Amino acid sequence: MASILVIGSSGQLASELKHLQTHFSPHQFQFTSQTDTDISDARAVAQAIGQAQPHFVINCAAYTAVDQAETDQERATEINVIGVKNLAEQVLKLKCHLIHISTDFVFDGKKSSPYNEEDTTHPISIYGMSKWKGEEAIKASGCDYTIIRTSWLYSSFGHNFVKTMTKLGNEREAIHVVADQIGSPTYCRDLAFFILSELEHLPTHKNNIYHYSNEGVASWYDFAYEIIKMNDLKCLVYPIPSTSYPRPAERPSYSVMDKSKIKSHYQITLPHWKESLAKCIQLLRL
């Protein structure tokens, strides 16, 4: 039995962990939100972790407003860098294990084959840079850690691309979606289940970075097309280039990740993104 403290409890992944906790009942779960525990405040972090006395800290707290980060670099840094450093330092003091969620945005998207964990990072946005610096802060801290980079997260909880496209598909006759950014959609419930299923094995492979996403490759257009199709909506979906939908922050044009390492270390198979999307949409229809 392990004691688990989940930081950032209001987000999609933390909500899935909360939903799944009854299936892992021998473990004791504690959840704290960014409002309750501002991780950029070292004293607040020390108090939260000190009171919880966890074996594992799962950090789901992050500044994820990619475009807003371009003009709000200070807050992005406070949460994604300083906050992560604060967590790592307290984890080191208590000799527990930090599970930190990172992103495909640490890469620049210039490759044409899937990124593995040894590939050189080169973030091209303030958000991506802050997440990379958070990874580096963990590695420099000396704490025991597992860093999981993931991509294109969605869930039946919170705000996400699946819910946005479903809403637009119900309201409009047609939508236009970027078709030249390629990655892998990831169902948060799959990632949450992996973390909890393998929790007690993570220290065996401590101080590793892993890539986790659902199998398969898609553009945002492909993703949107399947969302509309699976919802049986009549809305038409048209592909457009990124240049037709300019955003403040540059995105990697290709951020597919190689998951060979995590599949090998933990002997797992990963569901295809279409399979997981169907499960999520079925839940949203209930």
Image (cartoon, rainbow, N blue to C red):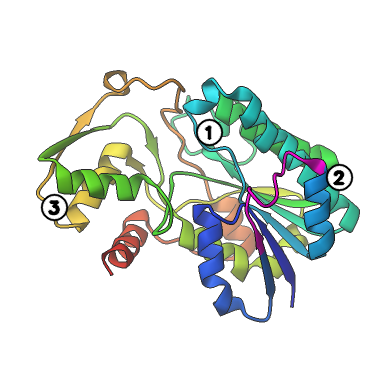
Q: Amino acid at mark 2?
A: Gly
Q: Residue furthest bottom?
A: 26
Residue 114, position as x, y percentages in the image: 48, 39
Which residue is most to the right?
Answer: 93
User: Mark 1 sits on what residue?
Assistant: 105
As measured in the structure, the alpha-carbon distance from the residue carrying label 3 to the one carrying label 1 is 31 Å
Q: Nearer the viewer, mark 3 or mark 1?
A: 3
Mark 3 highlights which residue?
Answer: 233
**Residue 142 - label:** 2
Residue depicted at 80% across the width and 57% down the height: 49
Please state the horizontal and vertical placement of residue 85, each as a whole percent of the image. 77, 39
Does any portion of residue 96 appear in the rendered image? yes
Q: Is residue 33 magenta?
A: yes
Q: Secondary structure at mark 1?
A: helix
Relative side of 166 to 21, left or right? left
State which region is magenta: 31-42
Mark 3 nearby-residue class (10 Å; few <14, some 14–19, many ≥20): some
Q: Residue at x 56, y 58 (%)?
A: 14
Whether 259 is among the magenta residues is no
- Of mark 3 and mark 1, the one earlier in the sequence is 1
Which is in the foreground here, disc 2 or disc 3?
A: 3
Q: Earlier in the sequence, mark 1 or mark 2?
A: 1
Q: Is residue 193 left or right of residue 1?
A: left
Which quadrant of the figure contains the N terminus?
bottom right
Q: Are marks 3 and 1 in contact (CB under 8 Å)?
A: no
3D distance between C-alphas at marks 2 and 3: 51 Å
Q: Amino acid at mark 1?
A: Phe
Q: Nearer the viewer, residue 40 or 66?
A: 40
Q: Dot 3: what SS?
A: loop
Proximity of marks 2 and 3: CB atoms separated by less than 8 Å: no
